[in-house]
């Protein structure tokens, strides 16, 4: 029972720490995916007196990803029965060219303001209209949520590190008598501390496995998938090999460093 309590303290502290770090990365992935979605759906409409050259316009404003001309045939079709045929060609020639611009990243308010002001100064462009969907507010809410979560995660990581270091010191004190005897017989540092490092490695594997299992199952939970899909947000999948290995690496580094620091506190006789 005592052994279970000792292991539980380290495993739980590592588990909370890893969950905090992974959750921040998880939210960042969601925000990045939603940002890409908003960027594809973000519309900038411009009118021009002449045909625009896509490469020149992109060179003028590198934030522009593509320039696509809007077909005005549907607009002209509405006047087909009201205007004589001989005037249709004149109307078609006199109408300005309309283009929709796609951006290569989600713009901030300052970027949009700058883009609009500079496009108006571009030769032949007469008007610029920005059409942003209302769900851009969700994007800013997600950014705020990410900031808050990051702040809390920092505090949780600090507390978890303190708990892990404290438990490692408890371990070293519990094994101090054994290490004292081994020290009398000239045992090396690694031989004396092998048990503590072994426990730290085992706890790291347990904590990282539990964390990986939880995040692997997130995109399999219907209520989470359905709720976020209504906001046009896809839950990023968890890669057990890549991301699981990173979590294990972080856990091993933290537990081994904590064990080493605790061992340095042990008095050598």
Image: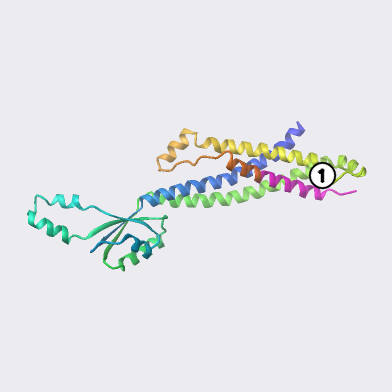
| Residue 256 within the segment the image draws in magenta | yes
Where residue 34 appears, x then y in whole percent? 43, 47
Specify the farthest residue to the right: 184
- Looking at the image, residue 84 sits to the left or right of residue 64; the answer is left
User: Which image quarter is the N terminus in?
Assistant: top right
- Looking at the image, residue 255 sits to the left or right of residue 104; the answer is right
The magenta-colored residue range is 250-269
How busy is the neighbourhood of tag 1: few (under 14 within 10 Å), some, or many (20 plus)?
few
The residue depicted at 86 percent of the width and 45 percent of the height is 188
Q: Is residue 263 above or below residue 114?
A: above
Quadrant of residue 66 in the image?
bottom left
Where residue 9 appears, x then y in whole percent? 70, 39
- Looking at the image, residue 91 sits to the left or right of residue 27; the answer is left
Quadrant of residue 60 in the image?
bottom left
Q: Is residue 62 above or below residue 175?
A: below
Instruction: List the residue tagged with mark 1.
Output: 190
């Amino acid at each position: 029972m005592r052994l279970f309590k000792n292991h539980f303290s380290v495993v739980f502290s590592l588990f909370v720490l890893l969950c905090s770090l992974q959750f921040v990365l998880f939210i960042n992935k969601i925000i990045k995916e939603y940002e890409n979605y908003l960027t594809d759906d973000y519309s900038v409409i411009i009118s021009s007196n002449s045909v625009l050259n896509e490469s020149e316009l992109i060179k003028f404003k590198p934030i522009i990803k593509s320039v696509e001309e809007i077909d005005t045939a549907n607009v002209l079709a509405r006047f087909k029965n009201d205007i004589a045929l001989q005037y249709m060609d004149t109307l078609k020639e006199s109408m300005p060219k309309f283009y929709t611009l796609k951006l290569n990243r989600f713009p901030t308010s300052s970027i949009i303001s700058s883009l609009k002001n500079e496009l108006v100064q571009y030769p032949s462009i007469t008007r610029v209209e920005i059409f942003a969907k209302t769900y851009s507010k969700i994007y800013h809410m997600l950014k705020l949520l990410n900031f808050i979560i990051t702040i809390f995660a920092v505090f949780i990581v600090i507390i978890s590190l303190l708990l892990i270091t404290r438990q490692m010191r408890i371990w070293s004190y519990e094994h101090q008598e054994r290490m004292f005897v081994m020290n009398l017989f000239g045992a090396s540092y690694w031989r004396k501390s092998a048990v503590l490092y072994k426990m730290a490695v085992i706890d790291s594997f347990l904590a990282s496995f539990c964390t990986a299992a939880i995040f692997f199952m997130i995109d399999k939970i219907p209520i989470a998938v359905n709720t976020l899909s209504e906001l046009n947000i896809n839950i990023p999948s968890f890669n057990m090999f890549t991301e699981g290995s990173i979590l294990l690496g972080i856990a091993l580094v933290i537990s081994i460093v904590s064990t080493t620091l605790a061992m340095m506190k042990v008095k050598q006789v």
